[in-house]
Amino acid sequence: MPMDETSKVIFLVEDNRGDIRLIQEALKATAIQCQVVIARDGVEAMAYLRQDGEHADAVRPNLILLDLNLPKKDGREVLAEIKADPNLKHIPVVVLTTSRNEEDIFKSYDLHVNCYISKSRNLSQLFKIVKGIEEFWLETATLPPIEGRS
């Protein structure tokens, strides 16, 4: 999908194919024009964000939706790396995960996550959650400018 000045980029870091499909459908159901870029593990996510290798031309996302339970490098490690990197730390990160574990919640906020949301297994509730994330982060909140965006 070609990018234009009004299109927003959501970077979805998720390994579950079913969740990817559902989140994509929920995002399509809103009026906000956005492109969804997907990484299926933590190593791929960091390569994309750092524009390494095949991702040299990757567009900096406006928002990251991050699952915690990922292969190769888990979401907690990814979050720590994003927030420790001066080039990435200003990108809002929303943890969107099935975990309701208090330790995961505290650890995520200790690592400066912008928001922690537990996924619902109820389809209509998941659509409502994703729509709320998109409306708040891409319409209501003022986000930092994206450097290097063409």
Image (cartoon, rainbow, N blue to C red):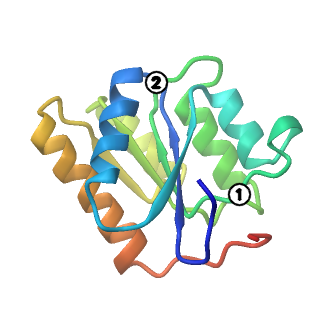
Q: Classify residue 68 as left or right of residue 105.
A: right
On screen, residue 44 versus residue 112, left or right, reads right
Which disc number belongs to residue 86?
A: none
Q: Position of residue 31 (x, y in %)?
A: 30, 67
Label 2: which secondary element: loop
Which residue position is annotated with label 1? 59
SS at badge 1: loop
Q: Residue lying farthest front?
A: 2
Query: Given the image, on which type of amino acid does mark 1 rest?
Result: Val
Q: Nearer the viewer, residue 14 or 8?
A: 8
Q: Position of residue 16 (x, y in %)?
A: 41, 22
Tell me the mark number nearer the camera, choosing from 1 and 2.
Answer: 1
Q: Amino acid at mark 2?
A: Asn
Q: Residue at x 64, y 54 (%)?
A: 83
Q: Position of residue 114 (x, y in %)?
A: 45, 60
Looking at the picture, how far across and down is residue 94, in whole percent? 43, 52
- Residue found 17% across the figure and 52% down from its top: 128
Residue count near mark 2 (Cα–Cα under 10 Å), binned few <14, some 14–19, many ≥20: some
Are the two marked residues, 1 and 2, in contact with CB atoms closer than 8 angstroms? Answer: no
